[in-house]
Image (cartoon, rainbow, N blue to C red):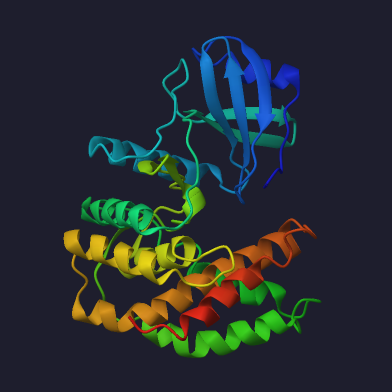
Amino acid sequence: MAQYSTLSPEELDEIVAHYEIGTPLNLEELQGGYGNSNFKLTTTDGKFLLKICDEKNLEELHQQITLLKHLQEYIYPTVYPILQKNGDALHVFVKNVNQKKYIMLYPFLDGGTPKPSKHVLAQIGETLAKLHHIPSLENLPRFPMGITQIRPFLKEVKDTEFAPHPFFLWLQSELEWILPEIEKPLPTGLLHGDLFLDNTLFDADKLMAILDFEEGCHDTLLIDVAMTIIGCCYKEDNTLDIDALHEFLEAYNALRPLTENEWECLDSFVYYAALSIAVWRFRQFNIRHPDPQRAETYHEMITRSANWQAIRI
């Protein structure tokens, strides 16, 4: 779990006082997630998800809130933040003189993360296609975990101890052939940007919500399709679930048919999605927040991209 921040009982009381949610009774750390500190908050009025936004700055969070308001207008199945007494969705908590914490509170929905299956991926495919039909917003960034992250990252590690790491030899060789492919003109629109299974919420086998629009952006729609393949269509041993993959693509294509050029570029974008997550994980758990237990998790993405090579849809 990404647990970068904690709260004392006194700090929790101060935060909860800004909401109409009763008195805090318990705060429980939640497993899962890579970029925030997540807690299950129980109060006298119910259960809530308290998220400390460790990875995003104030501008990015306001952008995220604007996007969620936009999605709410289209009744999109996600979880929307609870407003404070002053009407704001974002709480700025001054932890000490030199440290501010940005907090968002959500309803806590009982549900779980499913395993890939035909039924699960059909619902995800349909729901992703519905997202891609929603008009985009002005001033949304490009895909933040893609080349806009990778280029600064390469400069960041140049002449450091990480420069000779085998990961960078792999990364640079992959970029040579991927970049021309992903720069081809393809349909663009509103993206989720990080649709892994743990960013979905199911009640048994029924989709309740697509979660965590923190990487929401405007870019090539095929990025989202490829990211969902990498994040949702693989089994626990990182082998591709062919049946689930086909069901996802069929359900998606029924609502937003891929163009001929998109089908031709799908392979390249699957590699691009895997590479993007691999870079994020390597940087996050080896450089920014060193974590021996997660330092090697980027290998999972390399394995998945390698296992894709034998597949021809």
Asked if residue 225 shows in the view, the reply is yes
Quick one: 188 or 310, which is closer to the camera?
310
Q: Is residue 56 left or right of residue 14?
A: left
- The picture quadrant where one finds residue 142 is bottom left
Q: Is residue 172 left or right of residue 166?
A: left
Residue 52, percent across and down? Answer: 61, 36
Asked if residue 151 shows in the view, the reply is no
Quick one: 117 or 77, which is closer to the camera?
117
Q: Is residue 279 above or below residue 35?
A: below
Q: Is residue 36 left or right of residue 134?
A: right
Q: Looking at the figure, which quarter contains the C terminus? A: bottom left
Residue 35, percent across and down? Answer: 61, 50
- The picture quadrant where one finds residue 15 is top right
Residue 272, percent across and down? Answer: 46, 75
Q: Is residue 289 left or right of residue 85?
A: right
Q: Is residue 229 above or below residue 201?
A: below
Determine the residue positioned at 37% across, 53% down. 120
- The picture quadrant where one finds residue 81 is top left
Q: Is residue 204 above or below residue 129?
A: above
Residue 222, percent across and down? Answer: 33, 69
Determine the residue positioned at 42% across, 58% down. 193
